[in-house]
Amino acid sequence: MDKLRSMEVFVAVAEAGSFAAAARRLDLSAVMVGKHVQELETYLGTRLIQRTTRRQHLTEAGRAYCEDCKKVLEQVRWAEASIEGLRSEPSGLLRVSAPVTLGAAVVAAHVGDYLQRHPQVRVELVLSDSLVDLVEEGYDLAVRIGERVDAHLVARPLAPYRVVVCAAPEYLRRHGRPLSPADLPRHRCLSHLVWTRRTSWQLMGGEPGGDWPQDAVFASNNGEALRRAALQGAGLLMQPEVLVADDLAAGRLVPVLDDFLPAPRPVHLVYLPDRQALPKLRSFIAHLLACMAPSSVA
């Protein structure tokens, strides 16, 4: 029995909420996840997870053991890091969190370039728009969009996150070019499903909460799906510039309403202050700062 691995699997089940979710997170089969948990329960002589046909939850012993497991696993990571810090050549695993669109469109390419230069490093890039806890979830660093940064983290500024409104040339030929936010209700618009009047991008010069039409002709929870619809001439698209940069450069999409775009949002690279001495992290931070520094984007 690999006790540390079983503890890691058990913590993943506790955090993910199910064997299946933990299996996806760890790239294991659900059967193997269940085997690890069962071996722990047999070894400890107590039930850690109460299972029914419809749900599962930690027992009282499971909750206490989970907290202790997290402490043990963190100590193991610190022990490994102390040895790694003695090496001059970057090596080992880097776990990175980034927002979905920015991570897929920008960060992933820089990761690929970094790995070419440092073949002894492995990178797990997890894309999610939720805010991760670097310590609790075992991440080395994260790319975050927004003003607020936790005081206990080091935050290095990256190129800001800009939004653009655009459409295919064919759409503009058929429907005309909007000249101000007041024209939007007369256009066919593509919208992200997570947007609301409170959280949507606000165009400058428009009515508060009323800039982006609520009755979109096409809505999706995925920016890439919206981009593809825009390329087919389905309507006006408002999405991060990084998602459509190649289309704009090639003329497949045309920017509109440039004078009314919202202010760019700040982006930061964040990490724990006591981990920056690790060669893998230090070199990766330097690489991202060189590629994504505010001055690198006009």
Image: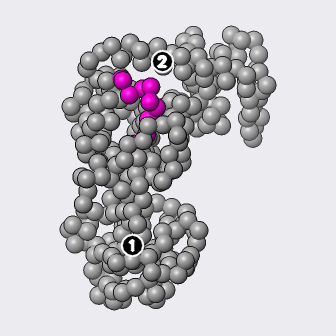
Q: Give the camera-side residue of 262 and 41.
A: 262
Residue 78, numbered circle? 2
Q: Is residue 12 left or right of residue 242?
A: right
Image point (45%, 81%), residue name: 205
Vertical relation: 28 (above or below) 71: below
Residue 61, image x and y in percent?
77, 21
Q: Is residue 276 magenta?
A: yes
Q: Magenta segment, which residues?
A: 269-278
Q: Which image quarter: residue 175?
A: bottom left
Q: Identify the amino acid type marked 2.
A: Trp
As for residue 34 lying within the magenta part, the answer is no
| Up/down of 130 relative to 284, above or below | below
Is residue 201 found left or right of 264 in the rendered image?
A: right
- Is residue 206 toward the left or the right of residue 160 in the image? right
> Residue 188 appears at what percent x and percent y?
44, 82
CA gap, disc 1 and disc 2? 45 Å
Q: Label 2 crowding class (10 Å Cα cut-off): few <14, some 14-19, many 20+?
A: few
Which amino acid does the dot numbered 1 rest on?
Answer: Leu
Residue 261: numbered disc:
1
Residue in view at x 56 percent, y 75 percent: 209
State which quarter of the image contains the C terminus.
bottom left
* Helix, strand or loop status at disc 1: loop
The answer to whether any part of residue 130 appears in the image is: yes
Say which residue appears at 36% left-offset and 23% top-offset: 278
Where residue 216 appears, as percent x and y from the top left, is 51, 77
